[in-house]
């Protein structure tokens, strides 16, 4: 089972069938003034575009301001989350730091439960603090706070 070997066919372009006997047209001489004009036109167009670029960008940003800001915030959030996860995973690789942070978290959780969740009066205090913080974040005014 020998594979078939194909021989490359080499064309002889010097054979009479490839040689044209027709007369060719006149050869146009190279004109440097025409190419200089073309280059100057290209440079003028590029200069005009770059001069108007701030106006184009201002109009574009003015028209699409909200989607651009939204896309930027989403992209920034994704980058921030990835960076935070990378930092946390690198901190987690340090031998004694991970168990130390776990102990700190358990200690804070125990303190929070003791301080706010065991008694009803403390739960009311936590609820009022939370509602006050929520009102500040959402921009609602508490009736007890003075107007500025």
Image: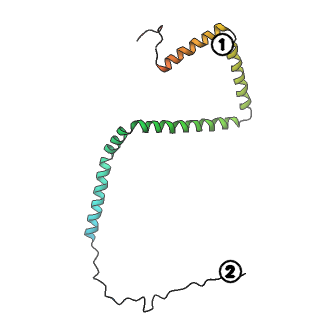
Whether residue 103 sits left or right of residue 65 in the image: it is right
Residue occupying the point 60% across, 85% down: 7
- Vertical placement of 40 versus 131: above or below? below
Residue occupying the point 57% across, 84% down: 8
Disc 1 crowd, CA 10 A, few/some/many (<14, 14-19, 20+)? some
The numbered disc on residue 3 is: 2
| Residue at the disc numbered 1 | 116
Residue occupying the point 53% across, 86% down: 10
The numbered disc on residue 142 is: none
Q: Return the x and y of residue 146 as percentages of the image width and height.
A: 44, 8
Q: Work out how far the residue at label 2 is from the one at label 1, CA to CA, in angstroms.
A: 85 Å
Q: Name the one closer to the observer, 96 or 8.
A: 8
Whether residue 142 sits left or right of residue 4 in the image: it is left
Residue occupying the point 49% across, 17% down: 136
Q: Name the one closer to the observer, 38 or 132.
A: 132
Whether residue 60 sits left or right of residue 12 in the image: it is left
Question: Quadrant of the rendered structure where residue 105 is?
Answer: top right
Q: Return the x and y of residue 84 as percentages of the image width and height.
A: 60, 35
The N terminus appears in which quarter of the rendering? bottom right
Q: Earlier in the sequence, mark 2 or mark 1?
A: 2
- Vertical placement of 114 versus 103: above or below? above
Mark whose residue sits in front, 2 or 1: 2
Report if the CB atoms under discs 2 and 1 are less than 8 Å apart.
Answer: no
């Amino acid at each position: 089972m020998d594979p078939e070997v194909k021989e490359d066919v080499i064309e002889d372009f010097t054979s009479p069938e490839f040689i044209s006997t027709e007369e060719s047209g006149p050869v146009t001489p190279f004109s440097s003034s025409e190419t200089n004009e073309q280059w100057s036109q290209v440079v003028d167009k590029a200069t005009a575009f770059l001069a108007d670029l701030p106006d184009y960008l201002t109009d574009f940003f003015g028209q699409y301001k909200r989607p651009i800001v939204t896309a930027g915030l989403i992209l920034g959030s994704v980058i921030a989350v990835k960076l935070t996860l990378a930092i946390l995973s690198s901190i987690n690789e340090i031998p004694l730091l991970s168990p130390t942070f776990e102990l700190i978290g358990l200690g804070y959780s125990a303190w929070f439960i003791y301080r706010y969740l065991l008694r009803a009066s403390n739960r009311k205090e936590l609820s009022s603090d939370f509602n006050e913080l929520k009102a500040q974040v959402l921009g609602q005014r508490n009736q007890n706070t003075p107007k500025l």
